[in-house]
Amino acid sequence: MSIYNDEVFQMACDQFQVIADYLQIDQNDRDRLMLPKRSMAVTLPVHMDDGSTQTFQGYRVQHHLTLGPTKGGTRFAPNLSMGETAALAMWMSWKCALANLPYGGAKGGVACDPTKLSRTELESVSRRYMQEMIPFVGPHTDIMGPDMGTNEQVMAWFMDTYSVYQGYCVNEIVTGKPVSIGGTEGRREATGRGVVYLIERATDMLKLDPKKCTAIVQGFGNVGSVAALSLALNTGMKIVGISDATVALYNPNGIDVAKAEQHVIKKGHLRAFDEADRVDPNEMLTMPCDVLVPSAVDRVINKGNAAKLKCRILAEGANGPTTPEADLILNERWDELFVIPDILCNAGGVIVSYFEWVQGLQAFMWTETEVTDKLFRILEHSFAQVIKRAKAHKISHRTAAMAIGVERVMKAKHARGLFP
Ligand code: NAD
């Protein structure tokens, strides 16, 4: 049994094998490209508020070290495993390569439910996790960022803990930190903004008027809430469905997303937001809309619902929302369903994280307009390449996007050779 034994890791491997077959990658190269280079598991004993000591399991996976340091988010989620972390790290590798960033993929996190921890406990878990990771990370080896269940504050605790151990301020050790300690203007919004930029490119291609379109957004955290707000405010799209871990809400007349956001800021979740009807969270995904944006957990589009999706555009804000079995069904529906695959769709976060890292290393800052302009330029280039390749080779957008990423990593590995 492998330490990565996990359904999500199996899914990432299955996706990779599809690409490896399409690119006719030699069997000798497949495991070298697919399997993580380094993986760490750590145990975190933490003092809880009630005087007890609880031990949490933490992970960090560095998928490949071929193109530069590794880069990836930190997830705090109850069922996080080494396998899921490895899958997320592998997707980061193809995502960074597609955007031409000088990084290998990484991912990490702690198996915990951050909503059940007090602020003091969350700080202790965060600091202990970073402290345990100090031998394995660094601004030139592995740079952490936020992901599900973590935020700017957690990044600030990571950065402070690392800096205290080094004896000087090392703000380039993490990205997605508050602007007051070297964070980048526009990083918090970057992933959601990128998602919306690409949705607009898709509506352009399909000749759809965004003002006449409706959208359903699953997940109302960093990615989902920014995407929903930006779709409503900047494109004029009507948001008819939103959800989080507590509730799914639907209103065919449109939901006031700014109000929903205020509700979440006050209460911490969408539950009890009463300006829409409660619906079954799974059924919400198959309700009629022009744009569906899964921005929460993995594998929500699967063989059970892929044929029933009624959207015109599937914009994958989350990592791994679509299973390979669902992909086979979506591929059959290519002329009625435009997929913006995750490694392209949510790349805005890592692209702006890259800007933040470069700015940190150079002790130099750019304005939010400069950051957003540069972000859109990179996304535009990646989008154009994916569409061109998909058309030329008659392949899905996902296959095209992943193939570009895998090819770049493979080319770099071949150029560097195998030591010794
Ligand atoms: P977050 O923790 O800020 O928000 C997650 C949201 O999803 C919350 O509203 C939560 O209640 C909701 N949620 C959790 N389980 C759910 C479920 N079963 N059904 C419906 N909603 C559920 O996380 P985030 O940073 O917005 O990340 C969301 C997804 O986007 C993840 O897959 C993450 O890996 C991916 N992603 C995030 C970033 C980033 O910059 N934050 C970048 C790229 C990709």
Image (spheres, helix red, strand yellow):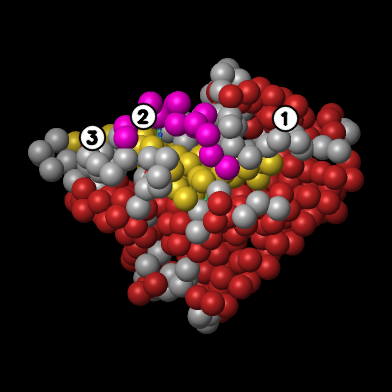
**What is the C-alpha distance between the residues marked 1 and 2?**
26 Å
70 is within the stretch colored magenta: no
The residue that label 3 is drawn on is 54
Helix, strand, or loop for circle 2?
loop
Which span is picked out in magenta? 277-290
- Vertical comparison of 119 with 1: above or below: below
Mark 3 or 2: the one toward you: 2
Mark 3 residue's CB less than 8 Å from ligand 1: no
Position in image of residue 386 (x %, y %): 77, 50
Q: Quadrant of the C terminus?
A: top right
Q: Residue at x 58, y 55 (%)?
A: 210
In this picture, is 286 found above or below 74? above
Residue at 35% across, 52% down: 256
Which circle marks residue 279 in the picture? 2
For marks 3 and 1, give the CA distance.
Answer: 49 Å
Taking the image as shown, residue 217 lies to the left or right of residue 112, namely right
Instruction: Determine contact: label 1, label 2, CB under 8 Å.
Output: no
